[in-house]
Image (tube, rainbow, N blue to C red):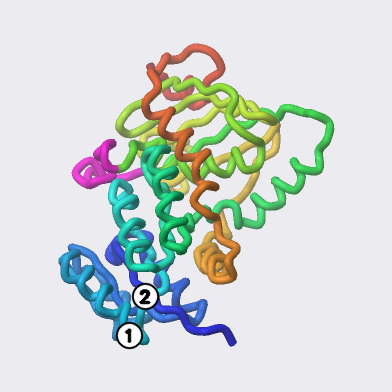
Amino acid sequence: MSETKNFALVGVAGYIAPRHVKAIKETGNTLISCLDKFDCVGYLDSYFPEAEFFYEFERFERHIDRLRYTDRKIDYVSICSPNYLHDSHIRFALRNRAHAICEKPLVLNPWNIEALEKMETESGCNIYNILQLRLHPAIIALKNEIDADTSGKIYDIDLAYITSRGKWYDYSWKGNSEKSGGVATNIGVHFFDMLMWIFGSIEHSVVHISETHKAAGFLQLKKARVRWFLSIDYNDIPAAVKAKGQRTYRSITVGNREIEFSEGFTDLHTISYQNILNNKGFRVMEALPCIDAVYKIRNAPAVGLSGDYHPILSEKNHV
């Protein structure tokens, strides 16, 4: 049996944190300490009721430092904090000689990755990014299919992801593009990573619209032409989906074929942790292409409805 590892978690009250806590439990490890400025963390009772909880980073930092000299030294720091804090919290983990496991996006700016790689080398600890779409069975099957195609075919892809959010969004850090990276980064980075992982690097990019609640554009990849649309606006959801009472719409078509991957997400964080613990996780430089892509997308001028844009833009009469 492998040795039990000790974990700390930053951002334990966040939306995605329970998946990390569950993964720590299901991989047979221990959550020692966690941090958040909010105390909506009652779910911890079902997993690690003995975990220490801190409001203030300074007290949390002191606690982690003290543990370095005990048999409860932290081996991994899981990072579920707001996007703009990821870089600082990864550095915190490495300074304390712990591996970092960070949610998407790893960082907001591509140059941060190069700096982190240097710090990773100096510390002797690793930085891992959660890129769970790469672990989804349907996505793996698609990658295997594309890899096996030696015809030189360029695939036509339409990607739409609409995950409607309420008024709270604009008041949170997620609604602040300087903190979240904007909608293309916050809800799109996993999809861009997945597309490049399967179809190759970006050769050309156009942004058609770039707004607070939605973004759309076109990507020419090595093996694909991609029209993409991302939104948090409920009004963008197709009428047929609304009629079913659903507030989320996810669609990827390759040619005329719909790639179905609405299910199968439940265990992907646990699988991610299993891979990381076996030293097979996705490392810091693997995140660079998607971080570079979303950085360029959010800083590119929007050209409006010209060229090859996503059909939803015509249906919704966007300007």
Q: Name the residue under label 1.
A: 70
Give yes or no for residue 172 being in the magenta stretch.
Answer: yes
> In this image, 12 relative to 204: left or right?
left
Q: How crowded is mark 1: few (under 14 residues within 10 Å), some or many (20 or more)?
A: few
Q: Which residue is drawn at 59% across and 24% down?
A: 203
The vertical placement of 195 against 98, above or below, is above
State the image coordinates of residue 279 (x, y, percent, origin top left): 58, 66
The vertical placement of 146 against 282, above or below, is above
Q: Residue at x 83, y 35 (%)?
A: 150
Viewer-proximal residue, 253 or 147?
Answer: 147
Q: Tell me which corner region of the image, top left, top right, bottom left or bottom right, holds residue 166.
A: top left
Q: Is mark 2 on a helix, strand or loop?
A: loop
State the image coordinates of residue 162 (x, y, percent, origin top left): 43, 40
Residue pushed farthest front?
122
Residue 240 makes an appearance in the image: no
Viewer-proximal residue, 102 or 236?
Answer: 102
Amino acid found under the numbered disc labelled 1: Thr
Residue 77 makes an appearance in the image: yes
Q: Which mark is residue 140?
A: none
Q: How far apart are marks 1 and 2 (CA)?
A: 9 Å
Viewer-proximal residue, 286 or 111?
Answer: 111
State the image coordinates of residue 85 (x, y, percent, origin top left): 28, 51
> In this image, 141 relative to 136: left or right?
right
Locate the C terminus and report the quarter of the image it occupies: top left
Q: Magenta segment, which residues?
A: 164-179
Q: Mark 2 points at which residue?
A: 74
